[in-house]
Image (cartoon, rainbow, N blue to C red):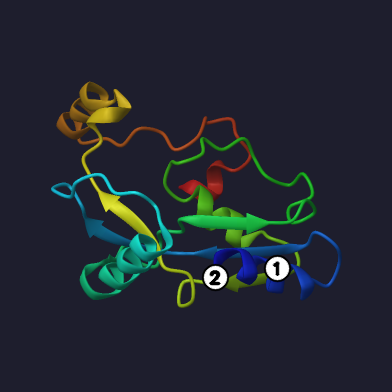
Amino acid sequence: EFIESARMVDRSAPAPGQFLLFGQRYELDMRNDPPAALTPPALDQLRQRTLAEGRSAGAWFIDFLVFGGATWDGRVPDFVVGRPKFDNFLVANARGVRVDGSRVIVATHQTHNYAHTGMREAAAADARSGQEAPLIHMDNPGKRYND
């Protein structure tokens, strides 16, 4: 469904490479699941389980982006990818066709903590200070969008 959806959006673009397919994820608690092979039957079971047990992360969470080479045409600030709101900027400023594939593409995000990032101490310090880490550098032209 993912690849075919991307092809359909690409074909509908007003100009070559001006399209964006994006969507939200479902959170699914898989912390106690054993490792599983990614066979077609297992993927179908995961999709069905995600639809039955998963919960939407919310409208602000854009978790997949498929785009053509001319979608932004060099108009993207130097964001720190993965920080809040960079994805919303990309959707708002995309040229050409924009399609929210959330109702067709089931994107599963495994619920987990962030200990694997090595940022545990920094996150704890941010939480104690009551301040958020900066989204992007203060001199960045995209800063106003992220405020």
* Residue contact at pointers 1 and 2, CB within 8 angstroms: no
Element at label 2: loop
Residue 139 coordinates in the image, percent (x, y): 58, 30
Q: Would you say 63 lies left or right of 32 here?
A: right
Q: Nearer the viewer, residue 29 or 89?
A: 29
Element at label 1: helix
Q: Nearer the viewer, residue 110 or 99?
A: 110
Residue corresponding to mark 2: 1
Q: Quadrant of residue 79?
A: top right
Residue corresponding to mark 1: 7
Q: Amino acid at mark 2?
A: Glu
Residue 77 coordinates in the image, percent (x, y): 64, 40
- Quadrant where the image shows the N terminus: bottom right
Q: Nearer the viewer, residue 21 or 79?
A: 21
Q: Residue at x 78, y 62 (%)?
A: 18
The Cα atoms of the two marked residues, 1 and 2, are separated by 10 Å
Q: Residues within 10 Å of mark 2 (few under 14, many from 20)?
A: few
Q: Would you say 74 lies left or right of 39 here?
A: right
Q: Nearer the viewer, residue 98 or 141?
A: 98
Q: Is residue 83 above or below residue 102?
A: above
Tag shown at residue 40: none
Q: Residue at x 35, y 49 (%)?
A: 37
Q: Amino acid at mark 1?
A: Arg
Q: Earlier in the sequence, mark 1 or mark 2?
A: 2
Q: Is residue 132 above or below residue 24?
A: above
Q: Residue at x 38, y 62 (%)?
A: 43
